[in-house]
Image (tube, helix red, strand yellow):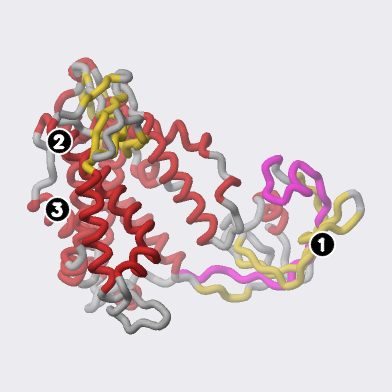
């Protein structure tokens, strides 16, 4: 019988023993299987003597078998005691009693904590309420028009939304600085591709006109040698082009996927897309509020092993992102400490959600997943193709199952707390500037 020792509120240690005879038997079995394919100088494949096979691979095979035996013995013991292990166990050899027939070791590990969720009836959250109106459809069509604009030269001074081609030269304390000069540079006034103070000084100039002005770079400017510095620029406008927006007509509708060019159908499709996006954003806000309610009303101790695993995952994720974007970085250049708070929050929330799901039977149902897929598919030209794409890969379905489960948790929380409707402006929800 395995001996279990309680080291702390979550930490446990279990002492186990693996029969040496079983290890050696499995070592010989694996070496025999290996002998059928192993190659060695002077022998045909499969004809290498067992003594030679053992000499070549015995140590490695024995380590594999021992590791597998330790794992099997450990999991048999924790299953027998109905323990839920959090993270990975730490194996350590243990002094024996002189009995060479067994290998003794101990495994130190953590168990999942008890999650105590308080009464949510006293908690509250705001439920955003937003409608899609005709002027929202009009504003979206205007955005679509701007995305398909063209530019035409004009003989006037530049203004907002104009495409301006110009030369510029900047000086810092009377001296030119790197990146401070260009010929035939182009930008659209008001798009924010350049600093606002610079764009503002381009306005009001016609082709052939020049202007000099001072400008102070922001303190957090990306180029450190210019951050917070005041520089002088001289600009000369070479050409001004005004934006030409397409009319909202049959041609425009066809360009946006309405085969018969019916503008009314285009407006209906734009409205439907906006309604789907509004629903998605409202759900995202509700989810954020619901998760904060759960975090604020739950008590539990965090397993250090799970936090460590999450820190490693977040750290590796950042390394991968930096390397994917062409950055050169080493593993030891990113401190694990910067992920500690985020990792603890994620682990805490994951444990709380798991408890809520298990106690309230909130697992995602197949019909919920199918409904989500259908909803996503409606935003594409061929919805059925999108549906098939999801069902072709179990991993894609698992992602949607996770989303459906989260929706179930959010709905459960909203049903437990004092939820009140909160009217929200459409532009605020969509993150559009007023």
**Residue 79 bears which disc, if any?**
2
Is 44 positioned to the left or the right of 118 in the image?
right
Residue that mark 3 sits on:
369
Q: CA distance from mark 2 to mark 1?
A: 74 Å
Quadrant where the N terminus is found in the figure: top left
Residue drawn 55% across the image and 49% down it: 331
Q: CA distance from mark 2 to mark 3?
A: 33 Å
- Circle 2 residues within 10 Å: few <14, some 14–19, many ≥20: few
The spot of residue 237 in percent (x, y) is 74, 67
Q: Is residue 121 above or below residue 132?
A: above
Q: Is residue 228 above or below residue 328?
A: above
| Residues at discs 3 and 1 in contact (Cβ within 8 Å) | no
Which region of the structure is painted magenta?
Answer: 219-245
Residue 100 sits inside the magenta stretch: no
The spot of residue 337 in percent (x, y) is 52, 34
Nearest to N terminus: mark 2 or mark 1: 2
198 and 340: which is toward the camera? 340
Nearest to N terminus: mark 2 or mark 3: 2
Residue drawn 41% across the image and 36% down it: 308
Residue drawn 16% across the image and 24% down it: 416
Residue drawn 81% across the image and 52% down it: 213
Q: Secondary structure at mark 1?
A: strand
Q: Is residue 365 above or below residue 143?
A: above
The spot of residue 422 in percent (x, y) is 28, 30
Residue that mark 1 sits on:
169
């Amino acid at each position: 019988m395995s001996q279990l020792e309680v080291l702390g509120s979550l930490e446990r240690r279990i002492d186990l023993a693996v029969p040496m005879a079983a290890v050696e038997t499995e070592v010989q079995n694996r070496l025999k299987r290996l002998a059928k394919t192993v190659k060695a100088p002077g022998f045909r494949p499969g004809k290498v003597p067992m003594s030679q096979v053992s000499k070549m691979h015995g140590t490695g095979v024995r380590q594999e078998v021992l590791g597998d035996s330790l794992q099997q013995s450990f999991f048999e013991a924790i299953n027998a005691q109905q323990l839920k292990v959090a993270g990975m166990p730490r194996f350590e050899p243990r002094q024996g009693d002189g009995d060479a027939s067994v290998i003794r070791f101990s495994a130190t590990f953590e168990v999942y904590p008890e999650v105590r969720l308080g009464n949510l009836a006293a908690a509250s959250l705001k439920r955003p309420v937003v409608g899609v109106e005709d002027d929202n459809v009009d504003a979206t069509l205007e955005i679509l028009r701007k995305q398909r604009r063209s530019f035409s030269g004009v003989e006037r001074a530049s203004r907002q939304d104009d495409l301006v081609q110009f030369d510029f030269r900047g000086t810092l304390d009377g001296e030119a600085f790197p990146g401070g000069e260009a010929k035939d540079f182009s930008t659209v006034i008001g798009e924010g591709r350049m600093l606002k103070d610079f764009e503002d000084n381009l306005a009001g100039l016609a082709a052939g006109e020049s202007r000099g002005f001072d400008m102070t770079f922001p303190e957090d400017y990306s180029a450190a040698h210019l951050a917070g510095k005041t520089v002088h620029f001289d600009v000369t406008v070479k050409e001004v082009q005004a934006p030409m927006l397409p009319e909202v007509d049959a041609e425009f509708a066809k360009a946006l996927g309405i085969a018969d060019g019916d503008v009314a159908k285009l407006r209906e499709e734009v409205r439907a897309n906006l309604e789907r996006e509004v629903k998605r954003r409202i759900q995202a806000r509700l989810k954020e509020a619901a998760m904060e309610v759960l975090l604020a009303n739950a008590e539990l101790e965090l397993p250090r092993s799970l936090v460590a695993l999450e820190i490693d995952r977040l750290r590796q994720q950042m390394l991968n992102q930096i390397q994917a974007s062409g950055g050169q970085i080493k593993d030891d250049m990113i401190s694990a400490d910067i992920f500690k708070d985020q990792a603890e929050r994620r682990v805490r929330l994951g444990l709380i959600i798991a408890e809520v799901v298990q106690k309230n039977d909130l697992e995602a149902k197949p019909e919920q997943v199918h409904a989500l897929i259908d909803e996503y598919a409606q935003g594409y030209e061929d919805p059925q193709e999108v549906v098939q794409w999801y069902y072709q890969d179990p991993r894609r379905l698992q992602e949607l199952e996770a989303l459906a489960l989260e929706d179930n948790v959010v709905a459960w929380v909203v049903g437990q707390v004092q939820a009140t409707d909160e009217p929200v402006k459409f532009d605020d929800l969509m993150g559009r500037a007023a």
